[in-house]
């Protein structure tokens, strides 16, 4: 097992586990606990298959390009413009959301200096600097952050394990059966990381598919643990962002802990999206690296 393989797995996990995971417990509580669990497992496997399919396309494409470049190659310039604009705006929208929420998480951690706008600027400056430095720096940061993220999930589960009760698990609710679909599907989106991990593993092809598999499967278990813990404690009182509902049962200390956890989750996703956008401008639209950064 090479160091680059570990970097690649951490990069994909970091791309997938982000802001979307905090909405999963709420959707599971509304649709029924086991309905939510089924969505996590089924859509997790579907996402794994999609990642493997796109990974095959990336591996067989010799040119150095990203998703919009692939669209141009296989569907033509017209579709490149249409899909390219959609991809660029969607990434910018996601990055903006991460910057805003990142500022709020930092404001929770440093309540005495609480100014979400200033913290959002700080969050943007630090992570954008890492994006500017490139994928190798991103991979090293992702490894540390992903390790901490997994550690936080385990600690959070152990912290709340004693308060989990099967009596709290909400029953099946037909009226909300489709509620988890969009939330869980969004929470598993990590396809933009595939070209980046291929770039990391360009000399280690035999580890490429393994990295995609491990990087896609581990988030399934993270989401399962998080959902079991949150819904098992909060039950029907599960809040939309999960953490606030837990504070009623585990105390206000969980709020600060959750802020650190949330900050790590969105930071890892921001880094991968940011470097993919940089490479999209650079490789697919032929914009000079200094400007694309």
Image (cartoon, rainbow, N blue to C red):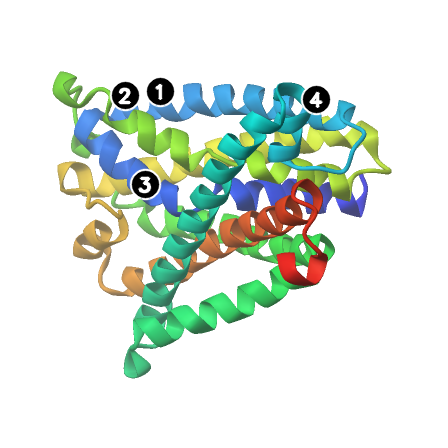
The one of 163 and 234 positioned closer to us in this rendering = 234
In the rendered view of the protein, which quadrant contains the N terminus?
top right
Q: Badge 3 is on which residue?
A: 229
| Distance from Cα at disc 4 to Cα at disc 3 | 36 Å
Q: Counting residues from the N terminus, which is met first, the one under dot 3 or under dot 1?
A: 1
Left or right placement of residue 254 versus residue 47 in this view: left
Left or right placement of residue 139 versus residue 271 in this view: right
Q: Counting residues from the N terminus, which is met first, the one under dot 4 or under dot 3?
A: 4
Q: Counting residues from the N terminus, which is met first, the one under dot 2 or under dot 3?
A: 2
- Residue 111 position (above or below residue 261): below
- Residue 42 position (above or below residue 287): above
Q: Counting residues from the N terminus, which is met first, the one under dot 4 or under dot 2?
A: 2
- Residue 52 position (above or below residue 164): above
Q: Counting residues from the N terminus, which is met first, the one under dot 1 or under dot 4?
A: 1
| Distance from Cα at disc 1 to Cα at disc 2 | 5 Å
Label at residue 103 = none
Q: Badge 4 is on which residue?
A: 56
Q: Badge 1 is on which residue?
A: 38
Helix, strand or loop for disc 4:
helix
| Distance from Cα at disc 4 to Cα at disc 2 | 32 Å
Please report the residue visible at 73 percent of the width from the left and 36 percent of the height from the top.
198
Q: Nearer the viewer, mark 2 or mark 3?
A: 2
Q: Nearer the viewer, mark 4 or mark 3?
A: 4
Specify whether residue 165 is in view.
Answer: no
């Amino acid at each position: 097992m090479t160091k680059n393989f570990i970097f690649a797995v951490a990069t994909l996990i970091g791309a997938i586990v982000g802001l979307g995971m905090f909405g999963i417990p709420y959707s599971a509580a509304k649709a029924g606990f086991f309905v939510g669990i089924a969505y996590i497992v089924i859509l997790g496997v579907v996402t794994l298959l999609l990642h493997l399919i796109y990974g095959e396309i990336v591996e067989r494409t010799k040119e150095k390009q990203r998703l919009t470049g692939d669209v141009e190659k296989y569907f033509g310039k017209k579709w490149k413009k249409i899909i390219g604009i959609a991809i660029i705006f969607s990434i910018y929208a996601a990055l903006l959301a991460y910057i805003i929420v990142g500022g709020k998480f930092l404001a929770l951690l440093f309540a005495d200096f609480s100014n979400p706008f200033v913290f959002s600027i700080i969050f943007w400056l630090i992570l954008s600097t890492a994006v500017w430095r490139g994928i190798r720096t991103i991979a090293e940061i992702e490894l540390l952050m992903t390790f901490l993220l997994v550690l936080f999930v385990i600690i959070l589960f152990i912290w709340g394990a004693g308060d989990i009760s099967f009596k709290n698990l909400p029953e099946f609710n037909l009226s909300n059966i489709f509620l988890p679909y969009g939330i869980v599907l969004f929470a598993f989106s990590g396809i933009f990381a595939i070209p980046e991990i291929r770039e990391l593993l360009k000399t280690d092809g035999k580890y490429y598919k393994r990295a995609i598999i491990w990087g896609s499967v581990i988030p399934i278990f993270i989401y399962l643990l998080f959902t079991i813990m949150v819904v098992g404690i909060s039950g029907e009182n599960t809040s939309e962002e999960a953490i606030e509902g837990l504070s009623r049962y585990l105390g206000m200390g969980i709020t600060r802990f959750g802020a650190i956890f949330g900050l790590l989750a969105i930071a890892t996703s921001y880094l991968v999206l940011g470097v993919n956008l940089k490479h999209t401008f650079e490789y697919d639209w032929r914009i000079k690296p200094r400007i694309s950064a």
